[in-house]
Amino acid sequence: MSELGRRLQAVLEIDPSAACVEFDATWHSWCHLSAEAHALDERLTAAGIARGDAVAVVMRNHPATVAALVCALTTERPVLVLPPYLPDDALTAAIAARQPGPVVVDPGAGLRTGAGHPTRLPAVAVELLTSGTTGPPKRVPLTLERLSHVLGGNVPAVPRLRDGVRIVWAPLAHIGGLWGVLQSLVEGRRLSLMTRFEVAGWVERVRVHRPTVTGLPPTGLRMLLDADVTTADLASLRAVTTGTATAPAELLVAFEARFGIPVLATYGATEFAGAIASWTLADHRDFATRKRGSVGRPHAGVELRAVDPDTFAILPAGSTGLLEVRGAQLGPAWVRTSDLAHVDHDGFLFIDGRTDDAILRGGFKVSAGALADVLEQHPLVAAAGVIGVPDDRLGEVPVAVFEARPGDPAPDEAELVAFLRTRVPAHHLPVAFHLVERLPRTPTLKVDAVALRELVAAQ
């Protein structure tokens, strides 16, 4: 058994009757989790699925999915993650494309086996799909070694059960939700599992479980600001972490002013098996005002640098280029990302855009994400997304789609253009603005550029 599997097994045996997972107002014990994992192991063995054979799992936010993860990791069967929010046809295609003889574990449908031999991935713990916000999702394998390293950083040598409760709202098919569940399990920490983020349920869990630190996406921060949430509701919190997408500095300032809780931005990716840079409370105390817009400093053992997008020459501190990363959880080689970033002289990382969201307008590059961030600074804009659309003369031009703030009049196009003219170059200005009631989003609450493109095309 791998080190990660041994750690999980040891935690399961500490106090089997203790509460482990809360779901739909019901607590499930460690014993219940262990029994479900054991029963699944027996069914997989009977189906001829051996150690090293991959198991495709439809990762619904459900205790049975947590049991499937425990089973897979303690028996060293790699997990092929299948997002539950895919349409049936797309889900069927994903199974057929990755595993000719699938074994599919789905809390809603049980175990199904297909003809043929399952995929063997002996060194892999989990194979995830990226979020696919700018194009087709990519599969990313996370090895047992990498996952063990990431999860073992703050785990005591002697396994024990902890008193706190981690609130997990992110999809288990996403690195954020998966990491939250696995970290809770190896730490011996109880977790409260939500099917998705919604303000009332999340606030109620904070009131009841009184965590000192919890996580929210930038959209969640904005939703709390727009809702009837009081400082008393969040009285236990000493900090809120945020990630999955870039959080505008103005949003963090507004949240901290309203609730008096520091917001600690993080930076990571599926390929990194989690966060590699973040703010700490100490850094927030000393640098929050001077370093607004940063996603924090690299974690211990992680190195960052920016390189020229064309020549890949290493750039000096403070210069924007393609971000490269290396560290213990990634291996000795530098990993090049698609993010444009700079690292300042104090080691703080700033994400300046992405190369894969670039709109090529008449030879000029326009970052769709960066332009959306600027548009969201308008006091009457609640959220925005930008895409490139074909243009006969310039190749591509930016088009903006936005939500108005609840209860406020929507700004017109002239007002938005005037606002942007003082903040971005002229060639960045969108050629059109579309007001929508709700922007299309992924399950992690990022604006879905693929769906946004379809929406604009339909209009």
Image (tube, helix red, strand yellow):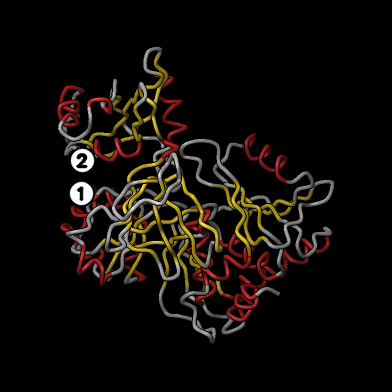
Could you tell me which residue is drawn at 35 percent across and 21 percent down?
362
* Residue 251, position as x, y percentages in the image: 23, 50
* Residue 178, position as x, y percentages in the image: 52, 59
367 over 363 or under it: above or below: below
Residue wearing tag 1: 250
Could you tell me which residue is drawn at 34 percent across and 63 percent down?
297
Left or right: residue 209 compared with residue 14: left
Taking depth in this image into account, of 380 and 18 the one nearest to the observer is 380
Left or right: residue 270 compared with residue 16: left
Callout 2: few (<14), some (14-19), or many (20+) C-alpha neighbours within 10 Å? some
Residue wearing tag 2: 377
Helix, strand or loop at disc 1? helix
Q: CB under 8 Å between callouts 1 and 2?
A: yes
438 over 8 or under it: above or below: above
- Which amino acid type is marked by label 1? Glu
Taking depth in this image into account, of 97 and 328 the one nearest to the observer is 328
- Which amino acid type is marked by label 2? Gln
